[in-house]
Amino acid sequence: MPVIHINHRAELTKEQKRALSKGVTDVFVNLLGKDPELVEIFWHDIEDHNFAKGGKLLEDRK
């Protein structure tokens, strides 16, 4: 069973997540012949205060 984790900044809408979830699932179905009901996707929304780049929190870089 494919288990997919998607880490992304917390800026995607539910509609975007729905569309991406469908697209990612379709890739596993079309390329690997997987049953779509077996494809699990976990979204990890990362807030700007939980991500740093260049030694600074993303919220401090704005």
Image: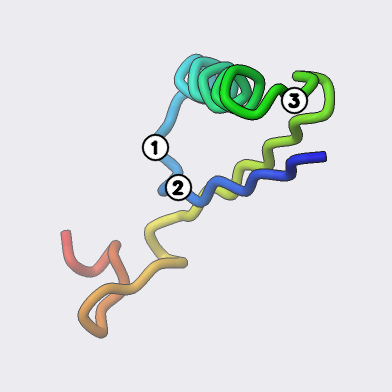
Q: Are marks 2 and 1 in contact (CB under 8 Å)?
A: yes
Query: Of helix, strand and loop, which one carries label 2?
Result: strand
Q: Is residue 25 above or below residue 52?
A: above
Q: Are marks 1 and 3 in contact (CB under 8 Å)?
A: no
Q: Real-space Cα distance between discs 2 and 1?
A: 8 Å
For disc 1, the marked residue is 11
Q: Hey, what amino acid is under mark 1?
A: Glu
Q: Hey, what amino acid is under mark 3?
A: Lys
Say how the picture is coloured.
Answer: rainbow
Q: Real-space Cα distance between discs 1 and 3?
A: 29 Å
Q: Hey, what amino acid is under mark 2?
A: His
In this picture, residue 26 sits left or right of residue 1: left
Q: Is residue 62 above or below residue 55?
A: above
Q: Is residue 43 above or below residue 14?
A: below
Q: Position of residue 40 (x, y in %)?
A: 75, 35
Q: Position of residue 11 (x, y in %)?
A: 39, 37
Q: Position of residue 59 (x, y in %)?
A: 29, 62
For mark 2, does the 10 Å Cα neighbourhood hold few (<14), some (14 to 19), or many (20 or more) residues?
A: few
Query: Of helix, strand and loop, which one carries label 1?
Result: loop
Q: Is residue 42 above or below residue 20?
A: below
Residue 53 lies in quadrant: bottom left
For disc 3, the marked residue is 34
For disc 2, the marked residue is 8
Q: Foreground: 38 or 43?
A: 38
Q: At 41% from the left edge and 48% from the top edge, which residue is drawn?
A: 9
Residue lying furthest left in this view? 62
Q: Nearer the viewer, mark 2 or mark 1?
A: 2
Residue lying furthest front in this view? 32
